[in-house]
Structure formats: C-alpha cells, structure tokens
Amino acid sequence: MNELLDYINDPDIRKIAGKIIADTRISPEDGLLLFTKAGLPLLGMLTGIVRRRKNNGFAYYIRNFHIEPTNKCVYNCRFCSYHKSSSDPDSWEYSHEQMLEIVMKFNDKEVSEAHIVGGVHPSYDLHYYGSLIKKIRQLRPSLHIKAFSAPELDYMIKLTGMTVEEGLYRLKEYGLDSIPGGGAEIFDEKLRAEICNEKTSSESWLSIHETAHKLGIPSNATMLYGHFETYAHRIDHMERLRKLQDRTGGFNAFIPLKFKKANNSMSYLGEVSIIEDLRNYAVSRIYLDNIQHIKAYWPMTGKAAAQLSLSFGADDLDGTIDDTTRIYSMAGAEEQNPVMTTDEICKLIADAGFEPVERDSLYNRI
C-alpha cells in the first residue's frame, strides 16, 4: 500500500494518505483537504483501505419495516417534504390499532426490526408512544424496536415533564431497544438556524444521544448534506460525532442523508451529483474512524447509487423496507415504492464484488 504514496503528487494529500494507510486518526484540517483536494479515484482507493480494515468485504442488510405514525409536525423545516398541516388532505395520524395492523402484516414474514419515526405530533407524549411499543412487543417479542429521532424524543419527553434521562429510561422500560439518527441535519448553529430554526438544537441532539448511550440504548447518527453547507460544515458535524463516539461508543452506524429537492421551500437549490455523494461517503468513512459502519440508505440514494457507494466506504444498505416508508418518496426520491427482497439485495451486493451478510439491528450476523 505504501507504493500508492509514490503516485500522489500533492504533499499535503500524500501526508494524509500516509496517516490513513498507517491507521492514524486524521485531523479536521486533513478531512477538509480530502474534500477539497483529493480526487475521487484516490478517495476510492483510500476509503477502500479503511473499509476492508473495518468490515472486510462484507456488506450488511436487515429484514425490516417502518412505521410512520404521523406526518403532522410542530416544526416546519425548510428542507422537509414530509411535514403537513392538520388541514392538509395528505396528512395522517395513525391510531395504535392502525399501527399494530402494520406489524401484523408481517406475522408470516421473518423480520428483525421495526423502525418507528415520523413527525413531531403536537399532542403525542412519551406514554402514548411507550404504550405503542409495549403493544408491539406483545405481538412480536423478539422484534428489535428502533424508534424516535432526537427531536421526537425531546418533544415527547418534555410533554411529560421528565428529564431526558428519566424519559429515555422509561421508554427503555416500555421496550425501546435503540434510536435512529434522524434530526441531526447539520450541527453548525448558524446554518441550522437558517434551515430548521425551530427544531431541537445541535447541543440537545448530541446530549440526547449521549444520555441514551449511557443508559445502554445504542443509536445511529446522520448528516443532511447537499444544501447550503460547506465542506467545513460537514467536517465540523463529523468531528462532533467522533468526539461523542470517543466518550460513549454508542453509535452503530453513520448515515449521510442527501438533500432531495421535491416539495419543499429549498427546492431551488437542486441536488448535488452522484460524484459528490461518493466523495461524501468516502471522506465520512475515513474521518469517522470510531464508528464501525457507514450506511447507504437505498430508498434515499436509489439502488444503483447505493450499490456504487459500497466501493466508496459504505458497508450497509439498510433493509428490505417492504414499501413502508414515505419520507424520501415525498421528497422526490427515485424509489417511490421502496421494497427489495433479500435475494435482490444479495445480488446487488454480490454484483458489486462484496459478500452479503444478513444482520440484526446491532450488526450481529444472522
């Protein structure tokens, strides 16, 4: 691998490449230089070294489904295509019975995980959602329940008057297993004020996840990219995640989420190219040296782009989904009815030159 260094002309990039090959942590300044000066072919080679070191030639998937309780939300983020007002004919709020019907549709199917996330409903508190989890647990005792983004948790816990620690502990008692990474968006406070000024702050997002980790509740992390942010904003975001992971070790995976332009007030920005997507995956894999997995969420990227991302640092494609999510469909994603069979996922992975591995929510091999 050291021979690779002989072909790198830029001394700054050669030095960073040497760190990567030696498995030495790169600095925020190094990360910014990778974004701005390293070509995509070189990034592919460097991130391939890191990917193989962490996950060999494996690419993971899970049998899962989503429950989206409501798209009514107290927040109205500028990038969001999911939010609807109560008077909008396209809004919904499911009852417990309706959500349990979704669970029961999978009674004759092998599924490992229920992913529950939606809008921040003005009146649904911790106990409303906690009792839902308890009912799901009664129907499918072995199902891993990954539920509620940090903004949802922040709001539902405040409605009960509990502290974050008290609320998360209570949800764990109800049966919550882990939490997803949504709502992180971009951590830079000035930029966050421009695109989602009403939403849970960066500090609160990080605090909620840190508290969850300390209570034994693992989580994922995300970053919304491809809008107003600069490369420096992305590195700052990843640096905050890396520091938290150093303290807790509680993040299972990092999921870059691409801004999609349909049906929101930032549509005029358009979307970044697949070249930029791959660059972002590659730098994320290199920079987040203490987060084991990088996920390419195929309902957002599309199947072909997700397949390609496996060669640029991603090692997880999420799961079968079974057409149970509308969040990215409403934002104009290529996959309007997201569903893949396990055979399709395995072929997609194998055709990219990797070994498909079915996993559970904590990345144990099934």
Image: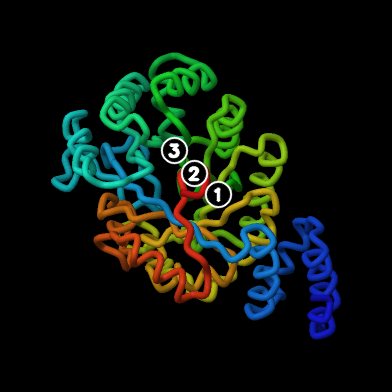
- Most distant residue in the top direction: 161
Q: Which amino acid does label 1 sit on?
A: Ala
Q: Residue at x 51, y 57 (%)?
A: 295
Q: Can residue 226 be seen in this view?
A: yes
Q: Circles 3 and 2: CB distance less than 8 Å?
A: yes
The residue that label 2 is drawn on is: 181
Where residue 315 appears, as percent x and y from the top left, is: 54, 61
Under circle 1, the secondary element is strand
Q: Is residue 124 visible?
A: no
Q: How crowded is mark 3: few (under 14 residues within 10 Å), some or many (20 or more)?
A: many
- Most distant residue in the front direction: 366
The span from disc 3 to disc 2 (Cα, nearest Å) is 6 Å
Q: What residue type is labelled 3?
A: Ser
Name which of mark 3 and mark 2 comes first in the sequence: 3
The residue that label 1 is drawn on is: 253
Q: Circles 1 and 2: CB distance less than 8 Å?
A: yes
The residue that label 3 is drawn on is: 149
